[in-house]
Structure formats: C-alpha cells, structure tokens
Image (cartoon, grey):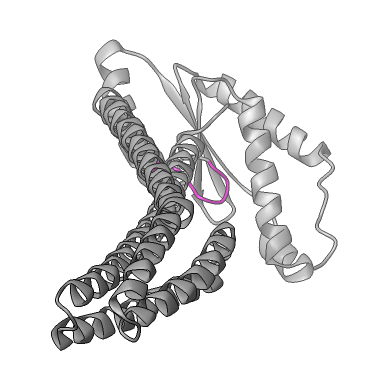
C-alpha cells in the first residue's frame, strides 16, 4: 500500500524532474539562440564589409574617371588614393574573417579570386594617372570591365551566399522561439493541472497529515501500541459509556519478569526487540475491539470493552502461556 509519505515524495520527485528538465531545455534553447544571434551578427558584419569593399572600388573607378574628365584635377587623385586605402582595408577584413571562420571556408576561393582581380584593377586605374588621355581612356574602360567582373563573379555570389545564411539563421531563431513558446505553454498547463489537483486534494492531504500527526501523539514509537497518554482518554470515555449503557469492561495489567536483567545480559537493542515482539503477540491474541497499551517500560495494559472478570482472566492466562511458549530470536551482537 502506498503511504502518504511515499505519494508526497513521488509528487515532489516528479515536480523536481520536470523543473530540471524544463530548465535544461530552456538553457539549451537560450544557448542555441545566443550562438545563432552571435553568428547572425557576424554575417551582418561580413555583409557590411563586402558592401564597403564594393563601394570603395566603385569609388576608385569614379575618382579615376573624374580625374580623366577634369584633365588631371589633383582632388580626384586624392579621392582615389583614399578609396584605394579603404578598399585594401575592407579586403583584408574579408580575408581575416574568412580565414578565422571554420564555418565559412567556402568563401575562401571567392576572396582569393577577388584579391587577384583587385590588384589588376588597381594597377589599371593607377595607369590612368600616369598615361596620356587616350591611353587613360582605354584603361578606364578596362577597369570598368574588371569592376563588372568582380561584381558579377565575386561580389554577388558572396552577397547572395550570406543573404541565404542570414535567412537560415532567422528561420532557426524563429524555430527556437516556437519551441520555447510550446515549452512555456506546457509548463503553464502543468502548473494549472498541479494547482487544480492541489485545490481538489488539499482537504484529503490535510486530513491525512492530521491523522498521521494524531497517530504519532497516541502511539508508542517503539512498539506501535497505544501510549499511556491515550490510555487516560480511553478510560474516561469507556467508563462513561459503560456507566451510561450499563456495560462492563475489564483491564489486564502485565509486565515482563526480570526485564532489567535481560537488558543487562543481552543489551538494550535486544531488549527493544523483545518489547516489540511481545507487543506483536498481544495484538495477535486480542480482539479488534480490544486496545493494547504500553503502560511504561516493560509494562503492558489491555483494555477489554464489554468483558467480564472471568473472560479477562482467561485471556490473561492465554497471553502468559503464549509468551512463555514463544521462541524469541535475538540480534547477533549483544
């Protein structure tokens, strides 16, 4: 039979396991969300760097064209040099990010290809500032073709690749949000169910706890028999009942001979075991309506409702004979 203590422990265990599992799922999802967010920031930064690179080389081409069309205005040369530095800086950032990212090694060939084309692109544009107008015009056209090649063969694939990666990360983040929402709803339902059960069964639980507490106050902790405190209550109540209904009752007092000597010889642990075994025999040989008490030490009392002196004497002799003829086992160590 499952006791209230076992049920309580089982309920608490289920609650703790559920809590720890939900916390673990939360931690797992939050960790994944953190990694996804961190990766999304990296992708956004990568895309920003590629756009800066594209803008820089485009600005280099415009500055060289403006220099050519303005018949050598030095302002456009300075603009070209500034944008050239920006382009080299952006390209180095792209290279470093690609080298350090274990998950983005597929971009490495594209970056290496860009680097070679940019060197050719830059060398072609620098000739614009050194050659005559006819040659410079051809160089600008060649640089324009190189720019278009870089844009279509390198920049667009990189941009599309990271746009797809960013979309995947957004989908993952949305999936995590859905999972955490489901977990929250499950936890909410669990709390509602548990709360409902508590409301429904709180009365039973309190009554069982009260009954258990009451039993602890009227029972002897060693033998499980009623204690002397409860005896006083029973005697008062049964005496009033017997007097009111003109009924009789009897009481048997018994103690174990030489119990102190037994304790001294075999030890207190064996003495306690003997008391429990004797208590068990008293319960076995008496009626359900009878009440057996541990009066104190090795003394016992049996209350017999609606019994006569003769029937009490017969039961007392029976109990004596049963205890005398019983084979009591002792603990190994004493």
Q: Residue 98 versus residue 123: which sits nearer the camera?
A: 123
* Residue 115: percent from left, percent from top: 50, 72
Residue at coordinates 40% horizontally, 77% vertically from top-left? 122
Location of the C terminus (image quadrant):
bottom right
* Residue 38: percent from left, percent from top: 38, 62
Q: Residue 121 versus residue 317: which sits nearer the camera?
A: 121
Vertical relation: 85 (above or below) 202 = below
Residue at coordinates 33% horizontally, 40% vertically from top-left? 177
Location of the N terminus (image quadrant):
top right
What is the number of callouts on the image?
0
For the view shown, which residue lies furthest in the top direction? 245
Res 65 quadrant in image: bottom left
Q: Main secondary structure of the magenta part?
A: loop
On whether residue 99 falls in the magenta region, the answer is: no
Residue at coordinates 31% horizontally, 62% vertically from top-left? 51
**Residue 31 visible (yes or no):** no
Res 150 quadrant in image: bottom left
Residue 143 relative to residue 310: left or right = left
* Residue 296: percent from left, percent from top: 50, 53
Q: Residue 129 versus residue 30: which sits nearer the camera?
A: 129
Vertical relation: 80 (above or below) 26 = below
**Residue 319 visible (yes or no):** yes
* Residue 232: percent from left, percent from top: 33, 41
Q: Residue 70 versus residue 109: which sits nearer the camera?
A: 70
Highlighted range, magenta: 217-224
């Amino acid at each position: 039979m499952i006791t209230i203590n076992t049920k309580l422990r089982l309920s608490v265990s289920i609650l703790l396991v559920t809590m720890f599992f939900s916390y673990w799922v939360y931690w797992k999802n939050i960790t994944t969300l953190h990694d996804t967010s961190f990766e999304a920031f990296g992708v956004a930064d990568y895309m920003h760097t590629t756009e800066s690179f594209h803008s820089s080389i485009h600005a280099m081409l415009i500055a060289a064209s403006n220099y050519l069309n303005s018949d050598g205005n030095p302002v456009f040369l300075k603009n070209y040099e500034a944008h050239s530095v920006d382009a080299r800086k952006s390209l180095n950032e792209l290279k470093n990010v690609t080298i350090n990212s274990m998950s983005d090694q597929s971009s490495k060939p594209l970056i290496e290809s860009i680097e070679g084309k940019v060197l050719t692109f830059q060398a072609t544009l620098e000739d614009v500032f050194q050659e005559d107008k006819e040659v410079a015009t051809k160089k600008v056209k060649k640089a324009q073709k190189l720019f278009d090649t870089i844009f279509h063969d390198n920049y667009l694939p990189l941009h599309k690749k990271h746009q797809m990666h960013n979309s995947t990360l957004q989908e993952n983040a949305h999936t995590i949000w859905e999972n955490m929402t489901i977990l929250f709803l499950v936890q909410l339902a669990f709390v509602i169910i548990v709360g409902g059960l508590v409301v429904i069964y709180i009365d039973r639980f309190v009554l069982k706890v009260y009954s258990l507490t009451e039993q602890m106050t009227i029972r002897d902790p060693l033998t499980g028999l009623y204690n002397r405190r409860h005896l006083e209550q029973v005697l008062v109540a049964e005496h009033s009942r017997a007097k009111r209904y003109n009924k009789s009752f009897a009481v048997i007092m018994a103690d174990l001979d030489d119990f102190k000597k037994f304790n001294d010889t075999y030890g207190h642990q064996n003495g306690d075991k003997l008391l429990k075994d004797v208590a068990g025999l008293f319960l076995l040989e008496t009626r359900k309506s009878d009440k057996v008490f541990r009066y104190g030490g090795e003394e016992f009392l049996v209350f017999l409702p609606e019994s006569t002196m003769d029937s009490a004497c017969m039961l007392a002799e029976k109990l004596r004979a049963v205890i005398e003829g019983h084979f009591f086992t002792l603990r190994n160590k004493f």
